[in-house]
Amino acid sequence: MAALLLALPLAACVDAPSTTPSQVQVAPASLGLGAQPAPSVQADWWKAFNDPQLDRLVAQLLTGNPTLQGALARIRAAQAELSVARTAHYPTINIDANETGQLLSNNYLYPRPFGGSFQWAGNAEARFRWSLDFWGKQAALIERARSASVAAALDADAAKLALAGMFAQAYVELSLAWQNLDIAHQTVDERQIILDLTQSRVAAGLENEASLEQAKALLALARIEVRRAEAQRDIGVHAIAALTGQGAEAYAGVTRPAAGVENALPLPQSLPADLLARRP
């Protein structure tokens, strides 16, 4: 019993053996990193629709949109900050010079020939300054300014693509509205033919008045669909004008799109989430 009591405190003082954590290299594919990166989007991808009106309206969108202009202003500010940071890293030389003329009096300190003559006095000064970056402060400022400039440029590119994507989506919806209007007009023509045939059959005693009233009701519903399709087309025109920063004066200039949804660009196999905002 005494030996057991003596062994307990000794056991408490024994250090555990050192262990080394096991390190296992994980394959990128197991983390979902093995796929090829998604292809970059062409800056002017909307030109693939071959629609001159779309090209013109997108150009108006990109030049007149305040969101994009704000992003471009941030680029210019970041580039100016980067230029200032780089300037502070290099030596600077300042040279100042001035010259003054004075007519000396005959009755002053200077006798002739200086007295009564016009004399020029000049002064020149040169200053050399170079702040040596011993501790890397200037390099850090330059790197920060460069990162800010790159980030601002990426923000501007993202804003441009997002705006173009929103506009192209509205433009495709306008094209669909025109197609729906065509279908509505075709339906009216078909219902009118059916009504004429029904009237002839009623006159010949082959149909009753209920069939005639049904044909009239279907024609009236088709005409309502035409009005609804026209309203959707007008809403699409108004949306296009609003996105380009224009008012009612631009409605007449927005005609039927030449681009159709069948001309849509093919989707890549790998489609990241942020790419959805860049496409119609």
Image (cartoon, rainbow, N blue to C red):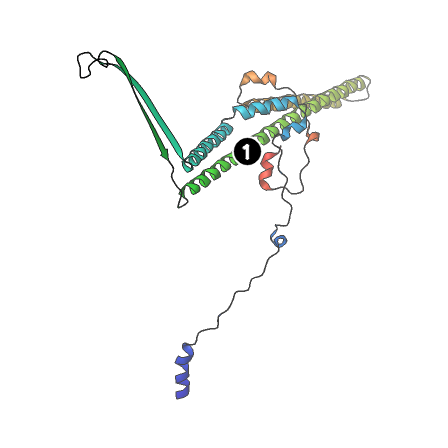
Question: Is residue 147 toward the left or the right of residue 279 in the image?
Answer: left
Q: Is residue 137 above or below residue 67?
A: below
Residue 278 x, y percent position in the rendering: 59, 34
Q: Residue 201, located in which quarter of the rendered image?
A: top right
Q: Is residue 14 above or below residue 106?
A: below
Q: Residue 38, located in which quarter of the rendered image?
A: top right
Neighbor class of circle 1 (other Cα within 10 Å; few <14, some 14-19, many 20+) is some
- Closer to us: 198 or 105: 105
Task: Please indicate, yes or no, whether residue 95 appears anywhere in the rendered image.
Answer: yes
Task: Please indicate, yes or no, whether residue 213 appears anywhere in the rendered image.
Answer: no
* Count of number-bearing discs: 1
Q: Quadrant of the C terminus?
A: top right
Residue 206 x, y percent position in the rendering: 82, 21
Residue occupying the far front of the picture:
113
Q: Residue at x 72, y 24 (%)?
A: 214
Q: Residue at x 36, y 27 (%)?
A: 95
Residue 6 x, y percent position in the rendering: 39, 84
Q: Residue at x 48, y 38 (%)?
A: 146
Q: Is residue 15 above or below residue 209?
A: below
Residue 107 x, y percent position in the rendering: 17, 12
Question: Is residue 138 toward the left or the right of residue 271 in the image?
Answer: left
Q: Quadrant of the N terminus?
A: bottom left
- Closer to us: 124 or 174: 124
**As shown in the figure, which amino acid type bears the numbered disc 1?**
Asp
Question: Is residue 203 toward the left or the right of residue 119 in the image?
Answer: right
- Closer to us: 161 or 40: 40
- Label 1: state its secondary structure: helix
Which residue carries the number 1 mark? Answer: 157
